[in-house]
Image (cartoon, rainbow, N blue to C red):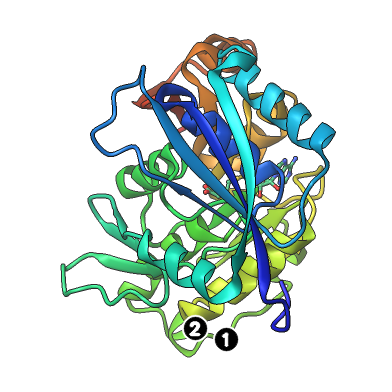
Amino acid sequence: MTETQNRWFALEITVLEAASEAIEFALNELDSLGTEIDSLGKKKTEQIEVIGYFNKKPSDETLQKRFNEALRVYGFPNEAIQKTAWREVENRDWLSEWKKHWKPTETDKFVIAPPWETVENTGKIVIKIEPNMAFGTGTHETTKLCLRGIEKHYEPAMSFFDLGTGTGILSIAVAKIKSQVQSPKAQVGKFEKQTALNLGRGTWDSILACDIDEDSVEIARKNAELNDSGIIEFYVGSISDETPKFNFVCANVTADVIVPLLPLLVKRAENILVLSGILVEQEDLVTSKLIELGFTDFDVAIDGEWISISVLKV
Ligand code: SAH
C-alpha cells in the first residue's frame, strides 16, 4: 500500500450467507487489503454481498482458484457464488467506508479494536490491532478460540510460543497479561533478546512469535509497538528442532499444517498446547495423532465451524 495511490479496486461477491466466511478466507489468502461483510439479519440460505479491497487486481484464474479452494475446504459447491463484479473506488472513500465497518471484538478478558476506535473503560484488556494484510484482527472464530484458551489456561509466569503469529494478536494478549503483574524487566520493556534461544527454554518473560510470512512479522512488530509490548521476540520462520521449550504454546494455523508439526509442538510445550485453525470435521484428524503421540488429556472448544484443542500436560 503506498501513500500516493488514490485508486483502489473493490471486488463485490454475491454469495450464499453460509459460505461468506469461506469467501473472506479466500480474500485474505489473495492478500486483500480489507474485507467488508454485511450479513446482519440475513439467513444462511440468503444471498449477501462480501467486498474485498485490493490495490491491484489478481488475475481471474487466481481468483477462481482461491475461491474454489476455499469453498471446497468449507464444504460448499462453486455455485455458492452467484456473481462477482469489480468497481473502482477512491482511496479516501475506501478508507472511511472500511473504517465505518470496524467494530471492536470482545472475549471475556479482551477487547480487540482498531487504533482509531476509542474503547470505553470496560475493565477488559484492550488490544489495538491495525487491520491490514495480516490474519488475526480478532474477528475470526479461531483467534477468539485461542484467546479463550489463553484466558482459561495462561498464567502470567508462563513463557509463551506463538506459531503463526499473523498480526501478533495472541502474543500481544499474553504480553498484556504479563504487564499487569509486577515484572521489573517487563515494565521497562528491556528484554535480553537471545535469552529464549540461548537457554533452549523460554524464561519467565519470554514471548516468542513466528510466522513464515515476512509481511506478517513486520505487521506484528508494529502492532506490538502500538501495544507497548516490546517484550515479544519475533522471527520469520516456523518451529524446528532448535525451537526452545515454552510453558504455553499456541498454534493457530490449519489442520494440514498442525498434524505434521504435532511431534515438535508437543515436545516444545511444557504445560499447555492450544491448537486451532481446525474445522469441526477435522477434529479426529488431529486428536488421533495426539493419541498416537500418547496424549489423551485434552479439551475441545467450538465456535461456529471451528474448534480449538487444548492439550493439558500437567
Ligand atoms: N495467530 C493469529 C494468526 C493466525 S493465521 C491469530 O490467532 O489470529 C495463521 C498464520 O500462520 C498466518 O499468518 C500464516 O502465514 C502462518 N503460518 C502458516 N503456516 C505456518 C508455519 N508452518 N509456521 C509458521 N507460521 C505459519
Whether the residue under disc 2 has CB within 8 Å of ligand 1 = no
Tag 2's secondary structure?
A: helix
Tag 1: amino acid: Lys
Give how far across and how far down residue 300 sits, in percent. 39, 23
Tag 2: amino acid: Lys
Tag 1's secondary structure?
A: loop
Judging by the rendered image, the residue that carries numbered circle 1 is 190
Discs 2, 1 touching: Cβ within 8 Å: yes
Question: How many labels sit on residues?
Answer: 2
Check the image and report above or below for 298 versus 222: above
Q: Look at 30% across and 61% down and name the residue there.
A: 111
Which numbered marker is on residue 185? Answer: 2
Q: Classify the position of the N terminus by image quarter.
A: bottom right
User: Neighbour class for label 1 at 10 Å: few (<14), some, many (≥20)?
Assistant: few
Q: Look at 40% across and 79% down and name the residue there.
A: 183
Asked whether the viewer can see residue 312, the reply is no
The residue nearer to you, when weighing 201 against 55, is 55
271 relative position to 25: left or right: left
Q: Look at 25% across and 73% down and name the residue there.
A: 119
The residue nearer to you, when weighing 44 against 296, is 44
Whether the residue under disc 1 has CB within 8 Å of ligand 1 = no
Give how far across and how far down residue 189 sits, in percent. 52, 85
